Image: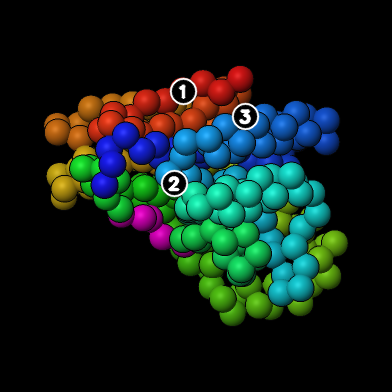
């Protein structure tokens, strides 16, 4: 594999969180980034919470962000692999991203070799040891039977309810006391001790680049305050501001 090939990473964009005016600006910035990736990317990794909420019905998907979806499809049509690890806000997917866009969708963390290095890539939700309550809730919300019953609700009401639930979830995450460190440091350390060279996560909306023994733990922050992206090339990982 050519080590000079570039791999891009983003997390926690939360499209749909704020007013229409703010979200249009954010989407324009995101689309420009995706167009930028198209010039030299080998693969692009979305590390969760691209949307502040996403609920996809069998024949209906939510309104808005057409330009983002088109930009992602353009990447795929250019031969660039797009990997989407779903987060705790955008968890309700069916097959739109796979069938219509051609992206790879993951409900669980991804372990992959890029260049000469082993990567463990995860949104981060559910990996904190003392977050038992959330892990129970996650199993319920991602249960296919529960999602099927929810899909019987009219889309206008169902998506509005998903939006409200997303805001409560974000409040819970921001106020949760995870103990020492950022709450994911120990999880990253375990993965590095198991052979990962890089552990890449999001979820906490805090940017980190920490050396742990022979590996690196990277948290990509969020696009709510300081949009940025990760890029890996020539066996080197960087976090770069995008503004």
Q: CA distance from mark 2 to mark 1?
A: 17 Å
Residue receiving disc 1: 240
Viewer can see residue 202: no
Viewer can see residue 38: yes
Mark 3: which secondary structure? loop
Q: Residue at x 64, y 41 (%)?
A: 14
Queried whether the magenta region covers residue 138, the answer comes back as no
Tell me: residue 209, above or below residue 87: above
Near mark 3 (Cα within 10 A), the count class, few <14, some 14-19 or many ≥20, is some
Q: CA distance from mark 3 to mark 2?
A: 24 Å
Q: Residue 180 in the image: x percent, y percent?
A: 31, 31
Near mark 2 (Cα within 10 A), the count class, few <14, some 14-19 or many ≥20, is many
In the picture, measured across the screen, residue 21 lies left or right of residue 136, that is right
The earlier-in-sequence mark between 3 and 2 is 2
The earlier-in-sequence mark between 2 and 1 is 2
Residue receiving disc 2: 43
Near mark 1 (Cα within 10 A), the count class, few <14, some 14-19 or many ≥20, is few
Q: Which mark is residue 224?
A: 3
**Residue stretch rendered in magenta on the structure:** 107-111
User: Residue 11 or 134: which is nearer the viewer?
Assistant: 11
Tell me: residue 124, above or below residue 62: above
Q: CA distance from mark 3 to mark 1?
A: 15 Å
Q: Residue 202 in the image: x percent, y percent?
A: 45, 39
* Dominant SS in magenta: loop
Q: Residue 10 in the image: x percent, y percent?
A: 50, 38
């Amino acid at each position: 594999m050519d080590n000079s090939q570039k791999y891009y990473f983003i997390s926690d964009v939360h499209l749909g969180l704020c007013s229409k005016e703010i979200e249009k600006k954010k989407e324009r910035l995101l689309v420009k980034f995706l167009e930028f990736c198209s010039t030299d990317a080998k693969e692009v990794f979305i590390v969760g919470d691209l949307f502040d909420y996403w609920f996809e019905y069998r024949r209906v998907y939510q309104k808005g962000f057409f330009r983002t979806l088109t930009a992602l499809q353009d990447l795929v049509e250019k031969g660039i692999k797009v990997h989407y690890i779903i987060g705790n806000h955008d968890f309700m997917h069916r097959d739109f991203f796979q069938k219509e866009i051609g992206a790879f969708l993951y409900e669980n963390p991804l372990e992959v070799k890029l260049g000469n290095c082993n990567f463990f890539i995860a949104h981060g939700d559910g990996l904190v040891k003392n977050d038992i309550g959330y892990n129970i809730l996650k199993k319920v919300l991602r249960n296919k039977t529960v999602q099927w019953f929810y899909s019987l609700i009219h889309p206008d009401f169902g998506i509005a309810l998903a939006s409200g639930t997303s805001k409560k979830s974000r409040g819970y995450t921001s106020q949760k006391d995870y103990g020492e460190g950022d709450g994911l440091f120990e999880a990253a350390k375990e993965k590095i001790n198991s052979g990962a060279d890089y552990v890449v996560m999001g979820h906490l909306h805090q940017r980190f680049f920490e050396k742990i023994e022979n590996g690196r733990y990277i948290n990509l922050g969020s696009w709510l305050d300081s949009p940025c992206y990760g890029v890996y090339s020539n066996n080197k990982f960087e976090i770069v501001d995008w503004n």
